[in-house]
Image (cartoon, rainbow, N blue to C red):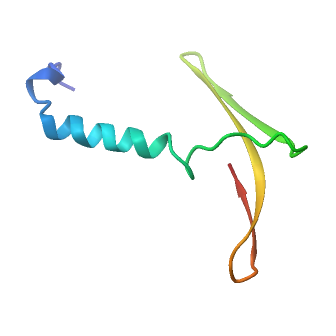
Amino acid sequence: MRAYKLADIWTQEHTKTFLSLKACLISEPVLSAPKYDGTPFILTTDGCKDAFAGVLAQRIETTLPGGKVVKRLH
């Protein structure tokens, strides 16, 4: 891969799109506050010699308007 400066090709449109994506990723339903009602937390981790990561999640049960019960990991 060639070395180049991102500033040479980055435009206002890129900034606008990046900020829109960032807003989507930090908003519900992608990101939501934890429930402290006794719902267990699930901790998932991964790592290698260069980096590590972790995700704290909960399995939430939701009843849809049609009556169907859906379990999702949040």
Left-right relation of 23 to 59: left
| 56 relative to 2, above or below | below
| 29 relative to 44, above or below | below
- Which quarter of the rendered picture does the N terminus lie within? top left
List x then y, in percent, for residue 17.
Answer: 26, 43
List x then y, in percent, for residue 29.
Answer: 57, 53
Give the residue at x 43% y 46%. 24
| 62 relative to 60, above or below | below
Q: Residue furthest right?
A: 38
List x then y, in percent, for residue 13.
Answer: 15, 41
Give the residue at x 76% y 46%. 58
| 25 relative to 70, above or below | above
| Total numbered labels placed on residues in the image | 0
Quadrant of residue 31 within the rendered picture = top right
> Quick one: 63 or 47, which is closer to the camera?
63
List x then y, in percent, for residue 46.
Answer: 66, 29
Quadrant of residue 9 within the rendered picture = top left
> Quick one: 60 or 1, which is closer to the camera?
60
